[in-house]
Structures are given as structure tokens and as C-alpha cells.
Amino acid sequence: MSDLAGRVAVITGAARGQGEAEARLLAANGAKVVLTDVLSDQGAAVAADIGADAVFVTQDVSSEDAWREVVNATLATFGRLDILVNNAAISRPLKLEATEPDVYDLIYRVNQLGVYLGMRAVIEPMKQVGGGSIINISSVAGLKGTSTLFAYTATKWAVRGMSKSAALELARYKIRVNTIFPGVIDTPINDANPPGMNDVLVKTTPMRRMGVPAEIAEAVLFLASPRSSFVTGADFAIDGGMSI
């Protein structure tokens, strides 16, 4: 689809699942990739398997200092930063009444604060190379209400709003900001769901199946590439029709 030769991407939550698929696909299309995650051993193994065009940095996305370290490591290793994929996220299948403030804060810090800190951290490096692409991974839960994912849904709606505002603010610097809304994707995040919940989610998906990480990665590749050069502030639902 595209050639990302000479481009450098940072991908959070890249030790497994969607982030891993995104890192592998961008690298296969010529990009240098910096994978980050709290799962250090798994992330380092993925980067090693990708090869010389990949490095891994342990990162807590809710920490401003950690973001500073990731950006510095990226510039020190590859000399530039062109693409950011804010992919890291956590979920707790809890209703409003059962969501304690400490749980809500944890989910907020990873899913919402982490995206804000990431976008803010890459503005200057992207300005220095004449522009860039920020791709924020929200969720179908950021397009519709849910009855069992209160905090997760709140943060994923916030990602959509932040992306819209950032797209308007950063267009002058040729930094594009777009949002992907995955539906039910076959990744380890579903392991925390109660018994039977995944079956219900599939039944409420018009295409009657889970998506796979590669289907999200393909959209990331498009938004990271020059082929999407006039696309910013857009919403890409990849959800088997769940949000229709």
C-alpha cells in the first residue's frame, strides 16, 4: 500500500495484540519503529523479532517523564519522529455503580491522560521534520453508549474529542490527527470480560465475528502514510458494523 521509508513511528501498547500488529506492518513497509509497553519482556521480544528497524522502550503512558524518555530515545536512536500511534489501553468490565474512583482513575490515566501526554510530547519533534501523523485508537465504545464498560467508554469518547481539537490546532504544522474506532477485536484485552460477554458482543456485531489485529493495522498503515495526506480529524470505524 505505501512506502514509509525514512519515517519513524512510536507505537504504545505494542507488546501484543493490535499494537504488535501495527508495529510489524509499519516496519514491513519501511518505517523504523519504537515499541513501548509496560510488558517489558514481551515488548523486547517483539522488537527483537522485527529486527534492526525496531527498538523497545518500557513506558507507563500516564507518566509525563516516561513520554519525555520515549521521545528522547526515539530521536537518539533514529534521529526523527514522524508517526505516533496511541494504542495503549486498559479496560474493566464494570457498570457505573460498581466503578470505584480508584478504578476510574486508573483507566482514565492510561486511556485518556496517556493519549493527551503522547500528542503533546510529539508536537515539537514533528514540527522539526515538517509534519507528521498522530493516530489515536479509540473504540466502538467511543461512538455509542455501553452498559458494562462505564469508565472505558468515558475515556474512549474523550479520545475522540481530543483528536478533533488536536486536528484543528495542529493542521497549521502539517501534523494530521485521526481516530480509529475498533469494534470487538480478538486481543488479550477481552480476557478480562465475564463469561459469555464475548459471545454477546459477537452477536451484536452485524458481521457476526471478531475482528483481528491485522485489520486495525491496515488502517493505521494508511493513516501513517502519504496516501492519507489530506485526511485529518477523521473517524474510522472498523467494527463489523456495530456502530451503524
Image (cartoon, rainbow, N blue to C red):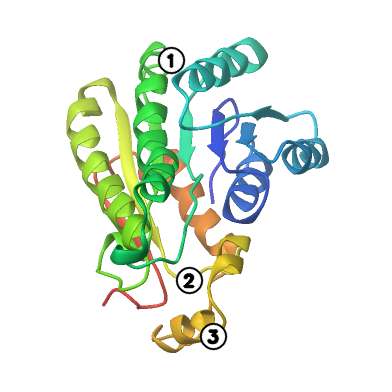
Q: Quadrant of the C terminus?
A: bottom left
Q: Check disc 3 and report the residue beneath it.
A: 196
Tell which circle, 1 or 3, labels the residue nearer the N-terminal end. 1
Disc 3: CA contacts within 10 A as few (<14), some (14-19) or many (>=20): few
User: Is 200 situated above or below 5?
Assistant: below
At 44% from the left and 43% from the top, the residue drawn is: 106
Which label was assigned to residue 125? 1
Percent across and percent down for residue 242 are 35, 77
Residue 45 is left or right of residue 217, and the answer is: right
* Label 3 secondary element: loop
Give the foreground label among 1 and 3.
3
Residue 227 in sight: no
Amino acid type, residue under disc 2 in the picture: Val
Which label was assigned to residue 184? 2
Residue 35 is left or right of residue 134, and the answer is: right
Give the foreground label among 1 and 2.
2
Identify the image quadrant of residue 74: top right
- Which one is nearer the viewer's eye here, 134 or 71? 71
Q: CA distance from mark 1 to mark 2?
A: 34 Å
At 23% from the left and 36% from the top, the residue drawn is: 167
Identify the image quadrant of residue 235: bottom left
User: Is 232 situated above or below 141?
Assistant: above
Disc 1: CA contacts within 10 A as few (<14), some (14-19) or many (>=20): some
Residue 148 in sight: yes
Disc 2: CA contacts within 10 A as few (<14), some (14-19) or many (>=20): many
Amino acid type, residue under disc 1 in the picture: Pro
* Label 2 secondary element: loop
Q: CA distance from mark 1 to mark 3?
A: 45 Å
Identify the image quadrant of residue 143: bottom left
Which label was assigned to residue 136? none
